[in-house]
Structures are given as structure tokens and as C-alpha cells.
Image (cartoon, rainbow, N blue to C red):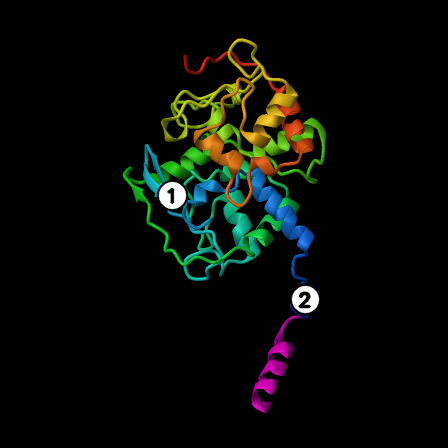
Amino acid sequence: MASQARCLVLALVVLSPALLSEIATAQPPSAAEIARGKYIFGATGGCGCHTVPKQPVNAGGRKYDGPFGTVYSSNITPDRETGIGGWTDEQIITAIRLGRRSNGERLVPVHPYTVFNGMGAEDLKALVAFLRTLPAVKRANQPKKITVPMFESVFLPAWLAAFAPQETPPTGVPTSGPARGEYLVRAVGHCGECHTPRTMTMATDNSRFLAGNPKGPEDSEVPNITPDKATGLAWSEEEIADYLGTGNKPDGDVAGGLMGEMIEGTLAGYKDLTKADRLAIARYLKTIPAVKNKIGK
């Protein structure tokens, strides 16, 4: 025991003063910060891409096919061997915002890091704190199957540089009004990833932001939610807010498919947003340019 104590003292002596200060002042996240992280988790739709329905939350393995091949979502539980339990907070945030794994490997932008980059620093910090509280699940990640030669070394970096959208993180997270709605729609909720049509390059066509997509994820038709009176979203602000909270449409139908999943979430979803935030989203949607783009019959 004495030799162990001497080794500990020696280790502390050689640590830099800055690191010692960091160790001394490091505090575990508060209950309020973890609750905020859960709320942000819900505002993303519950990170459902990382969960196979009816299987452990965040354990990965969900399959996504694209023109480049097939990828599977990653295990983002705190398991140290197969998940992100061995990553630092900064490494997790870098993966969310910049699409880089802890080893520097670039993520395929099925994970929407190009828009998650617009998330505020305090929200990301809280989100990471929440993710660390979840049950660790030991499930090895499935390797991706890229069918396009030189896709990751040449074509993906070129595509990201030329065509990828790029949100700008706010200096402070908006707390109310249309600015709050814009933040939730564009960055956290990443609504444009499904609701914005894509060009021939598969980049979102932001000149028609949220104008609908006839062939969205899983080959689904994704509606136009711009305020165009003929082809867009004609619901009132209250109706939009109620839909996000319940999945119930004004005509009596209910949300299905991926939108139903986003509303229900996993451990939390859009349904768990406050009425104020759901109304902020609705008010923001009323301010975006109306685009005539009929989806479906």
C-alpha cells in the first residue's frame, strides 16, 4: 500500500498545473444538465437512426442503403468496447458535429452532421451527459459495404466540400420565438434532411427548403411543409403544434412511417417538446418561403 501511495504522489507531481486544476474543478453533470440532454435527444426525434425498432436503444445496427452502398448505424451506448464509452466528450461532439470518429475516420453523411453542426455548444454538452447515463449494450458495429470505388478517399471529401449544407452554431441557443423554431427545425430536428428535395448530386436543394421529397428516406413520399397554399402545409400554428405532440392530423389521420417514429421517439421524441417549442416550430414554418411543389396525388 505504501508503494502504491508513493506512485500516486509521484504521478500527481509530474502532472501539469493546468491538468491538476482541471481535475480539481471537474464536476459530474447535474440532474438539470442531464434532463436538458434528454430534452435535446427528444428534439432530434430520439436519435432513432441508431435504434433498430424493438431492440435496445442506441445500440445501432439499423440498415441504410444509398447510391454508394450500405451503411449501418453505430452503437452509441456507453459500452467501452463496442460503443462510445471510451470516447471523450469532445470526441463525441466532434462525431455529432463534424462527422469524425474518435480514430479520425470520416462518417458517411447518412448521419446528418452537416446540419447537426448548427447545434449550440451547451446543448451538445448536455446531450453527451445524457448519453452517458444510458445502459451500455455490447453490440459490435456492422461494417459498411461501399460499392463505389474511391468513394471515401476521393468522392465523399469532394462532395462535402462542393455540395454539403453547412449550418452555423449559434453563440447562444435561442430560447423563444421564430429564432427558437428555426434552430429546432434546421439544426436539432434536422427536418430538411427528409423534407427538402435533393438534386442530382444527392445534396439537399436548399433553394426549395422543406418543399417535400417524392422519394425520401426508405423510398417514402415526404410532404411539402412550406406555407404554399396549394401544395404546402395549410394547417394553423395550433394544428402543427398539436401534430408534433400527438401525431394526430387535423383530418383525423395519424403520423406514420419515419415521422411517426420521430414524434414517438425512443426514450424521448418530438412529443416531449414543450408546447412553447412546438409553437415556435410552427411559427417558424409560417415564415419560410412558400414553394409550389406537389407531392403525391
Give the image quarter of residue 245. top right
**What is the C-alpha distance between the residues marked 1 and 2?**
42 Å
Residue 84 image position (x, y, % from top left): 48, 56
Q: Position of residue 111 (x, y in %)?
A: 45, 40
Helix, strand or loop status at disc 1: loop
Relative to 178, say whether 110 is above or below.
Answer: below
The answer to which of 55 and 40 lies nearer the viewer is: 55
Is 29 in front, or is 278?
278
Task: Please give the residue where the numbered disc 1 appears in the rendered image.
Answer: 62
Residue holding disc 2: 18
Give the residues in magenta. Answer: 1-16
Amino acid of disc 2: Ala
Instruction: Give the residue displayed 57% in from the left and 89% down from the top.
Output: 1
Judged by its main secondary structure, the magenta piece is: helix
Residue sitting at x 41%, y 42%: 53
Crowding at dot 1, Cα within 10 Å, few <14 / some 14-19 / many 20+, comes out as some
Q: Residue at x 53, y 17 (%)?
A: 251
Mark 2, other Cα within 10 Å: few <14 / some 14–19 / many ≥20: few
Residue 211 coordinates in the image, percent (x, y): 50, 19
